[in-house]
Amino acid sequence: MKARDVVRSRGHPLVQGLHKTTFEVTRECELTLSGDCIIGVCADKGAADLSAPFKRLLSDDQAVLLTRLCAGSESVEVRSRGSSQFTLDHPTDLVWRRSGFVCGRTVGIYSDCVARTLPRSFIDRLRQGDDLIVELIVEVPATPDESC
């Protein structure tokens, strides 16, 4: 089973991409230097706004999340896991984490990429205020009984 959702946001001159364990996209339009995990602002969705079918699949311990981040000609793919512990109820934020920590903002855990590991050319595009398109594709592999 598969589901897809898209979040539209944009960069900001204060995007740093320095956080060691997360990256975040937010509906908030302002950014300070303390927000070193935030890569996108003015998003059209927070975790609570993701589609119901998408949230249902992502809230499965077997879920695999592929996130495609696109800014200008730059594109980055991030692989993460879903969790039955996800509530996906935060009104403004979406957070991808390297760890297994879960809260209402968390949309991906055990992510293979965080703010600090994003290509600097990608971060530069975001600092220039480029649009950031976040494509999320979740898949729950079929169990052997379901594949027949």
Image (cartoon, rainbow, N blue to C red):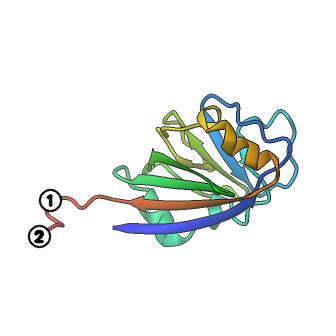
Q: Nearer the viewer, residue 30 or 133?
A: 133
32 versus 88 height, above or below: above
Which SS class for mark 2? loop
Residue type for callout 1? Pro
Q: Which residue is mark 1?
A: 144
Q: Which mark is residue 148?
A: 2
Observer-nearest of 123 and 86: 123
Residue shown at 64% from the left, 41% from the top: 23
Q: Quadrant of residue 124?
A: top right
Left or right: 88 with respect to 43? left
User: Who's the residue at 14% across and 63% down the image?
Assistant: 145
Q: Position of residue 91 (x, y in %)?
A: 71, 59
Q: Quadrant of residue 134?
A: bottom right
Q: Position of residue 46 (x, y in %)?
A: 68, 60
Q: Is residue 1 left or right of residue 122?
A: left
| Residue depicted at 50% across the width and 63% down the height | 55
Quarter holding the N terminus is bottom left
Q: Are marks 1 and 2 in contact (CB under 8 Å)?
A: yes
Going by the numbered disc 2, the residue's amino acid type is Cys
Q: CA distance from mark 1 to mark 2?
A: 7 Å
Is 112 situated above or below 81? Answer: above
